[in-house]
Image (cartoon, grey):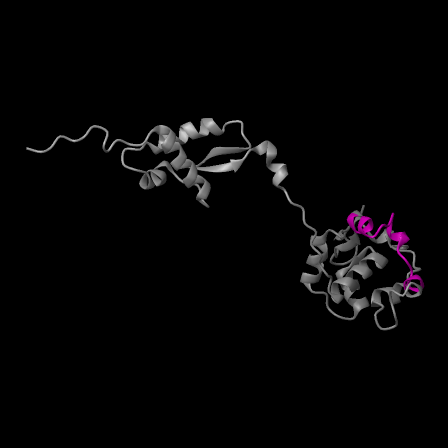
């Protein structure tokens, strides 16, 4: 004859305690957890799914909510408060000499084709150089030339002008101005500036080469 089992000896903990268990596991987990995942870690007889629902109601309307992600659950910041968690950072990116010269050529000779950039620089323009300037938003594609092959042109953007405090590309400083300000010397002057001398009428006499 076996001894009678003491009532409540193996009874699951109260629902409030089960909620605390679920809360602790979800806060500590780096990934969403399913009720089955939670149940594996809880004492026998616990109802993880019910505990999750109780916990969801408890967190309703608060800064952190318990949300469903597929079949799993996770704590997430309330959508209307997400802006409080945003963090803006300023990333400083230094342009390579090739990118600097290419940008100068586009600025002083726009609209200009890749072939014209290469002719002025005297070397081929890598795709990475152009892609970097496009990614920065400082140059963009212009209209195609109405010449054989209809090559695409490049021009500077409003973002470029805004970054350098210019109203238009015509406000770019001339070569003499840059040298007078000590920003250039005989060795560092980009070929683009030497070619344009900073005083050329940018784009003058080229409008008839483009399609409308």
Give the residues drawn in magenta, as a range.
159-178
Nearer the observer, 5 or 195 = 5
* Quadrant (top left, top right, bottom left, bottom right) of the N terminus: top left
Residue 13 is situated, as x and y percent measured from the top left of the image, at 31, 32
Q: Is residue 15 left or right of residue 81?
A: left
Nearer the observer, 126 or 59 = 59
- Asked if the stretch drawn in magenta spans residue 169, the answer is yes
Task: State the residue lying farthest toward the left.
Answer: 1
Nearer the observer, 153 or 172 = 172
- Asked if the stretch drawn in magenta spans residue 179, the answer is no
Examine the rendered structure and indicate whether residue 126 appears above or below residue 75: below
What residue is shown at x 24% (from left), y 33% (from top)?
10
* Quadrant (top left, top right, bottom left, bottom right) of the C terminus: top right
Q: Quadrant of residue 4?
A: top left
- Number of numbered markers: 0
Residue 193 is situated, as x and y percent measured from the top left of the image, at 87, 64
Nearer the observer, 185 or 129 = 185
Q: Is residue 24 left or right of residue 162?
A: left
């Amino acid at each position: 004859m076996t001894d009678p089992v003491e009532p409540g000896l193996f009874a699951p903990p109260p629902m409030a305690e089960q909620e605390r268990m679920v809360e602790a596991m979800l806060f500590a987990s780096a990934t969403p957890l399913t009720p089955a995942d939670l149940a594996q870690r809880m004492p026998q007889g616990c109802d993880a799914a019910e505990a999750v629902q109780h916990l969801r109601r408890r967190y309703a309307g608060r800064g952190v909510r318990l949300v469903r992600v597929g079949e799993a659950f996770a704590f997430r910041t309330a959508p209307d408060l997400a802006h409080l968690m945003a963090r803006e950072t300023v990333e400083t990116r230094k342009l390579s000499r090739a990118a600097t010269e290419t940008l100068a050529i586009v600025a002083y000779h726009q609209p200009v084709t890749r072939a014209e950039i290469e002719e002025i620089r005297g070397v081929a323009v890598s795709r990475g150089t152009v892609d970097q300037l496009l990614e920065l938003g400082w140059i963009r594609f212009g209209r195609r030339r109405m010449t054989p092959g209809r090559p695409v042109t490049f021009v500077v953007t409003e973002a470029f002008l805004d970054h350098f405090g210019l109203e238009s590309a015509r406000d770019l400083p001339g070569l003499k101005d840059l040298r007078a300000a000590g920003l250039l010397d005989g060795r560092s002057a980009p070929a683009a500036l030497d070619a344009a001398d900073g005083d050329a009428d940018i784009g003058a006499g080229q409008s008839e080469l483009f399609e409308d």
